[in-house]
């Protein structure tokens, strides 16, 4: 074999440099993803272009309603007079001002443990 053929078989060019890279399936996938990005940007621009460019009209002014507030003392509307976060045990029921849950049965949670 001539020396140029042996060098080409080893993956080198005649001048001693590395052989040029070859396109494979990953290069095609890269090109396809670039094309998909460009098409997506075009669709995004077309969607944005459908919206009007004028400033929307200001919303009408609505007067605030007079709503009753909770009575002072922080009872949270509990009919017992004491409640809210301080009168009930911690947890969601206590934070809402509701009545506490009933105590567990005697003898443990299963009812038969000493």
Image: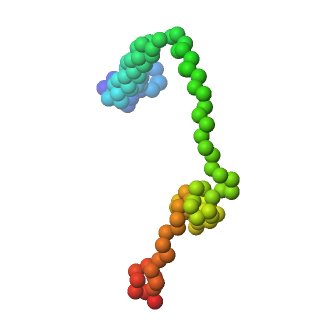
Asked whether the viewer can see residue 6, the reply is: no
Q: Is residue 75 left or right of residue 51?
A: right
Q: Tell me which residue sits at (56%, 20%) in the image.
A: 60
Q: Is residue 85 above or below residue 28?
A: below
Q: Tell me which residue sits at (62%, 64%) in the image.
A: 82
Task: Spot the residue most to the top.
Answer: 54
The quarter in which the N terminus is drawn is top left
Q: Is residue 79 above or below residue 23?
A: below
Q: Tell me which residue sits at (58%, 64%) in the image.
A: 80
What is the image's colouring?
rainbow
Q: How many marks?
A: 0
Give coordinates of residue 14: x percent, y percent: 42, 21
Asked whether the viewer can see residue 17, the reply is: yes
Q: Is residue 15 left or right of residue 81?
A: left
Give coordinates of residue 94: x percent, y percent: 56, 62
Give coordinates of residue 98: x percent, y percent: 53, 61
* Of the pair 42 and 28, the residue shown nearer to us: 42
Task: Spot the residue most to the bottom.
Answer: 114
* Of the pair 68 and 112, the residue shown nearer to us: 68
Q: Is residue 72 above or below residue 86?
A: above
Q: Tell me which residue sits at (59%, 40%) in the image.
A: 67
């Amino acid at each position: 074999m001539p020396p140029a053929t042996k060098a080409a078989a080893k993956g080198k060019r005649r001048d001693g440099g590395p052989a040029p890279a070859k396109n494979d399936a990953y290069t095609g996938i890269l090109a396809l993803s670039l094309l998909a990005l460009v098409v997506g940007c075009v669709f995004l621009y077309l969607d944005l272009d459908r919206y009007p460019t004028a400033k929307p009209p200001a919303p009408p002014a609505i007067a605030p309603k007079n709503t009753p507030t909770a009575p002072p003392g922080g009872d949270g509307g509990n009919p017992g007079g004491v409640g809210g976060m301080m009168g009930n045990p911690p947890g969601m029921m206590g934070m809402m001002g509701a009545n506490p849950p009933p105590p567990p049965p005697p003898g443990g949670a299963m009812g038969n443990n000493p």
